[in-house]
Amino acid sequence: AYDWVIDGQGSPTTARLAWLSGARVRAGWAVRVWSRMYTHVVPRSGLAKVYVVRERQRFLEMLGVPIGEPRTRLVVTADELRAAGTALREAGVPEGVAKVALVLSVSEPIREWPAERFAELAHALSTEGVAPVMLENPGDAAKLQRFRKVAPDVPVVRVFDLRLMMATIGSCGVLVSGDTGPAHVATALGIPRVTLYGPTDPVQWNPLLPTTPVLVDPGVTVMRARERRQHVQHPGLVGIPVEGVLQEVRRLLAARNDSSSAVTHLPIPASR
């Protein structure tokens, strides 16, 4: 019973779902034969690369919807922040100090920063009075084991629940990760992040703000998803040094000048 469906995925499955919805307006990318299932199409090729949020705004422009700056925004509730605080305390994270969240997970080996590098970064942060916090996501077991061999004392918070992950990131001062979902969550929560890139293009996947610095592995070129899937045994982003990441974390923490969270939160009634 939707009036509009905007398909930003552009796969045969999502195009079919858009068509089956019966919506009066069905917008999608002008790609291959399944674009015939849309009523409005946007060309995807032949244009300069832009931040993905801006790219999606083109659908709204085509449909006559006024737009502003390309930005994302997420909120967590006060109760969720309290739950994250409890999880951090139970994991052994000290209170009253700056906290830096670490995320090992990425969807492809070629996009991984080695777990051992994360462990070195965690040790360096600890020596500077900053509390590193490893956020364990589903599928992290093997990488987490490698991390713990080098940094056995770093607190680990299991964030299998999406809302807990959001609130935990929102309770930290900075997030360090590869190009993966939690990095975008951090941006939407207003949390600075250091993001490590290799085969994905930061022009498309980073808003390129002072609070979202980019570190690129010089030995890994940008490639398409099909090419990336061929590198199942890739060693990852070994060309990005720990010191470079540490410098960016220091800069972001200094800019915040506050070890508490600046995350936006809204108290949502329990009845909602």
Image (tube, rainbow, N blue to C red):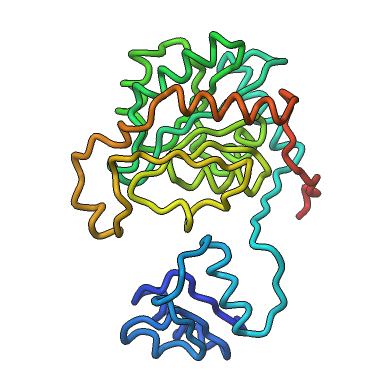
Residue at image location 48% in from the left, 28% down from the top: 245
- The answer to whether residue 15 is left or right of residue 79 is left
Q: Quadrant of residue 197?
A: top left
The answer to whether residue 222 is above or below residue 10 is: above
- The answer to whether residue 137 is left or right of residue 174 is left
Q: Quadrant of residue 272?
A: bottom right
- The answer to whether residue 31 is left or right of residue 261 is left
The answer to whether residue 170 is above or below residue 6 is: above
Residue 252, x across and y down, in percent:
63, 31
The answer to whether residue 30 is above or below residue 218 is: below
The answer to whether residue 203 is above or below residue 55 is: above
Residue 83, x across and y down, in percent:
67, 31
Front residue (pair 33, 168) = 33
Residue 216, x across and y down, in percent:
40, 41
Q: How many marks?
A: 0
Residue 270, x across and y down, in percent:
77, 47
Q: Quadrant of residue 108?
A: top left
Front residue (pair 30, 167) = 30
Front residue (pair 246, 106) = 246
Residue at image location 55% in from the left, 44% down from the top: 162
Which quadrant is the N terminus positioned in? bottom right
